[in-house]
Image (cartoon, coloured by chain):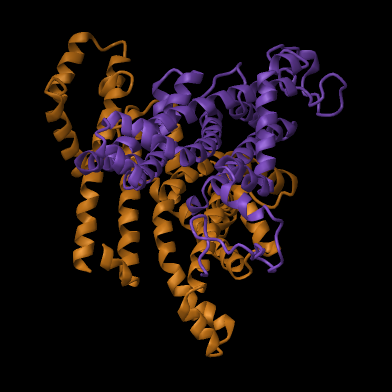
Chain colours: A purple, B orange
Amino acid sequence: MTASGPFQEQPVEACPASPTDGTCLPDDALERSYYESQAKRVWRRFLHHRLAVGGGGMVIVLLLMVFFADFITPHNPLELETARRFIPPFTHPSFVLGTDEMGRDLLSRLIYGGRISLVVGMAAMFATIVTGLFVGLISGFYGGKVDNALMRFTDTMLSFPQVFLLLVLAAFVTPTVISIALIIGLTSWMEVARIIRAQIKYIKEQDFVMAAFALGASAYRIMFKELLPNAIAPVLVSATLNVANAVLMESYISFLGYGIQPPLASWGNMLTNAQAYFDTATYLAILPGIMITLTVMSFNFLGDGLRDALDPRLRM
Amino acid sequence: MLHYIAKRLLQAIPLLIGVSVIGFAMMHLAPGGPLAVYTLNPTITAQDIERIKQVFGLDQPIHIQYLKWAAGMFTGNWGNTFFGGRPVLDVIMERVPATLLLMGSGMSLAMIIGMLIGVLGAVKRYSIFDYLATTGAMVTLSFPTFWFGLMTIFIFSLKLGWLPSGGMFTLGGEEDVFDLFWHLVLPTMVLALVLVAQWSRYTRSSFIEVIHQDYIRTAKSKGISSGRILLRHAFPNALAPLIALAGIQLPWLFSGALVTETIFGWPGMGRLFVDSLTMKEYPVLMGMVMVTAIAVIVGNLLADVLNAMIDPRIRLDG
């Protein structure tokens, strides 16, 4: 009598009561909450999370900014002119954010630096997710010895502090956008692998997967048609949070001089140069840092909101 | 109890082996391999290289090489530096105290502030303070540490002139405890920043879980003051999971120390690491990677054992 749910018989005359104050809800409210599509429910929960919406909006703005960099930058970011070095921000009509130690337009460099940082961040995220997904899927699906071996390997990789491993690898390779993204991916897939493995182990026990096994579906089919689509929520959340982490990591290694090499600008290496003029031209150090923080924060808020919206159970 | 400790010790062994295999593989991945210093030297001929290979046993099969190398690691023979030829282990060990001091003070500060924020957030859940604290944690987790370090130097050192911008002691000054403390303030603040966010988040969720349990309600209904409930009843139980956090945080702490030491010129392991990178001192780099990984494994082991000692529930599922 007290139980209610989509499969329970509903009292025909009773009006659906609002959970907060017991008043009647609009006629279709119950129906809506039961039969609303998953996507709609996720979207509604996401919109509830104001910081996440803000983060998402900011991410879109940043992506548009770097995508259309060629059209919106007022100057060539590599154009040197010693006659106009160190113009402070907001003092020159043409160089809105001022110029750096070589007279290059700071706004243009920030936009192009953002393109590098975001491309590295996205590519590194991709490498992280693919590796983590592969390890987690194999581990969770096969279990037993395979699982044990892969998880011990994951634990081993987690024992290395990431920045140490990253810098050693960065010192071995010729720094390019691709190589930097790859080594970030190689040193940060472990968390993803663990999350995916746990999710796969859980889904594997569900009836519909049992049914697929009983029908004699191949391992390949079960992994990619049954398990993977149902693990998409944590993958999406990890992917978003991993862009944030990758942007941060790229800025670390570029700042220390092992990442993106000048004259190509990245937010990290812009800070390296800025250190030398710290006392006289502090804005050179402040602006790239603000861009990094803003980007990382936007992706973090977006990922956090996605986690809440997609699956409240995932919340730690 | 002993059974549990023995079990955790045994679990750490494959990890240590794994770490050593990866360390060994990386040494061979390095440009020029383990002999980089000789192959890059123009006065050494190809025959010399062959002879050195024989002397070092580098012509032997790879698994024999690994076993010899691992035995060397185990007995403290970590090879010599390229420049100066000093034992790698000595070079690293002389940097350990400075790093430990920085990491210890950073962690302590982060624990105190983080736990305070976490407890307040849990008690006044969904209040404005709680909202600000959780949002603030997210914001600080997004700061690039090195940039935050530069900003603190700019504000507290260059503009206000309150604190020194780097180093461990004033050059040519008295090297006493006060001077050391003065130089420690800024790096500690920077290192603690990210850790505070983690401590406050974990403390908050751990406390929220504990204060909704039946025994807390019982204590309340017996009329015990809320301060006493918090300190005597809730705190010890909420604390247990936080010990594990200290273990989990170690890799972060090392990474954070590396960045902080670089910014502030703090003469610890992180600084040594970055200097070794510029000089391509591969033996030192490998040694450091090994030292930090081993420290992380041992730290996690200690945290688990300590946790089991104070929380009897753990042994059941251990």
Q: Residue at left 14%, top 29%?
A: B63
Relative placement, left or right, of B222 versus A12 is left
Against A176, residue A16 (above or below) is below
Q: Position of residue A277 (x, y in %)?
A: 69, 30
Residue A254 higher or lower than B311, as above or below: above
Question: Number of labelled discs?
Answer: 0
The reply, left or right, for residue A265 in relation to residue A312 is: right
Foreground of the two, A299 or A233? A233
Rendering coords of residue A12 (x, y %)? 60, 62
Residue at image x 49%, y 84%?
B218
Say which quadrant the C terminus of chain B sits in. bottom left
Looking at the rendering, which quadrant does residue A110 occupy?
top right
Q: Is residue B110 visible?
A: no
Q: Answer with the quarter of the image where residue B269 lies.
A: top left
Instruction: For the N terminus of chain B, give its image quadrant.
Output: bottom left
Q: Quadrant of residue A160?
A: top left
Task: From the viewer's perspective, tell me whether residue B155 is left or right of residue B68.
Answer: right
Point 67% across, 42% down: residue = A53
**What is the x, y in percent for residue A272?**
60, 29
Answer with left or right where residue A101 lies relative to residue B306: right
Give percent across and percent down for residue A296: 60, 38
**Towards the viewer: B80 or A137:** A137
> Measuring 24% from the left and 50% from the top, which residue is drawn there?
B12
- Vertical arrangement, residue A39 with respect to residue A91, above or below: below
Residue A12 visible somewhere in the drawing: yes
Residue extending farthest to the bottom is B222
